[in-house]
Amino acid sequence: MDSNKLYYVVGLAGAGKTTVCKQLAECIDGGAAPQTSGRFMDFIKKNGVETPKSLDAISHEKREDLINGLHHSFLQDKSKNSYTFLDGHMFVTNSNTGLRVNAMASENNDVSDGLIFLNTPNEVVASNIDSDNQSGKRNRSECSIDVLNELSEEEFQGAEDYCLLNSIAFGVLNNISLAGQFFEVGFDDVYYLNDYYLSKNTKLRELYKAQFESDLSPSSLRKQHYELGSKLVEPLEKKVGADLSNFQVLSIPRSGNYIANGFCEGFNGRFIMSKEPAEIVCDMDESKGLVIIDSVIDSGNTVRNIIEALPSTYVQPIHVVCLAINIKALEMIESYKETVEFHCLGFSNKTNRPKGIFDMGARLYGTPD
Ligand SMILES: O=P(O)(O)OC[C@H]1O[C@H](OP(=O)(O)OP(=O)(O)O)[C@H](O)[C@@H]1O
């Protein structure tokens, strides 16, 4: 039983979690995908709550007790199956208040070994909701793509927080369709993010989250980036088991600059500031390792262009350190796993690249237009 695993597949309603749970269970020996919604209905009824709607009227404490109780009841499944996959949510909308409320057990108590975020394009989520409603299979509220994007970012961030807090696996499973047909997914298709995190320190995590507050002035944001950068040295040295003095640092302008400056506070080695591959190759020292610092990896193009330009004679360790990595870049990152190590404080699933006042460079340099 100790080696048995239980995972929640989380994501928006309409993302295809039930189907994917079944596929995951089928592709692995001893896999099971209990029908989570049926179990949920039975459990709340047994505890005096007739419908999910009436769950929205009970007190927060009672609701949390029920969620934790249902969660702990899955231990029975875990004891019987090598792998249990459950359809779960981080948040749901309370139909009385319209507010988003917690839907995941607050006391994990080692029941769940991980959360797998089902990354389904929100256009597909919208069309699934629409066809379920039309066929009468389910009655789900319809939202615009912008609202679905916001909800799915919130769901993803909630899942990341939960996994870091409970020290459990955090996976991403891309639910990609071609010509309207979804590919069958398997347990091997899950990308686990845990190894990329630079630190589990809660203070650093708070500082990381604080820099996303959009009302920060450029000067406060710059200070925060500098402070974050200075606090990344120790976790990096610890994680990679190497001393920074064996490296040179490359800062990617312009959003990486304040982090890189903080990072190099006590560093006396070579410091390069450029995003031009040819210039970087010309300025670098081939006898030293390379730490590349940026604020964010979105598509991954910037960092890939630099890595690709490095001469084949360069055989030193390469570490890319940034605050956030978008899951869009996961495939690219994994393709370099033999030569480059990527590190971050958090991931993001933003569909659209932040623009104007939401763009990190614009926020740092006070150029929102
Ligand atoms: O992974 P990618 O899709 O290449 O995106 C990542 C790049 O985007 C940002 O820079 P941006 O181009 O916005 O310029 P700035 O830092 O000068 O504002 C960021 O600082 C990265 O360098």
Image (cartoon, rainbow, N blue to C red):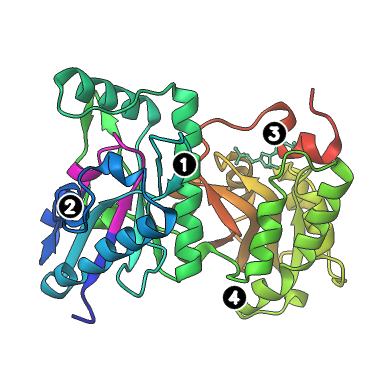
Residue on which the image places disc 4: 239
The x and y percentages for residue 65 are 34, 63
Q: Which residue is mark 1?
A: 100
Left or right? Give the position of 281 relative to 319.
right
Identify the residue position indicated by label 3 in the image. 358
| Residue 45 disc label | 2
How far is the residue under mark 4 from the one under mark 2? 48 Å
Of pointers 1 and 3, the one earlier in the residue sequence: 1
* Sequence-earlier tag: 1 or 4: 1
Between marks 1 and 4 in the image, the one whose residue lies nearer the viewer? 1
Please state the quadrant of the image where ligand 1 appears: top right
Chain part drawn in magenta: 8-20
SS for callout 2: helix
User: Tag 4's secondary structure?
Assistant: helix
In the visual, does 264 lie left or right of 344? right
All told, the count of numbered labels is: 4
Mark 2 residue's CB less than 8 Å from ligand 1: no
Sort mark 1 into few (<14), some (14-19) or many (20+) by Cα contacts within 10 Å.
Answer: some
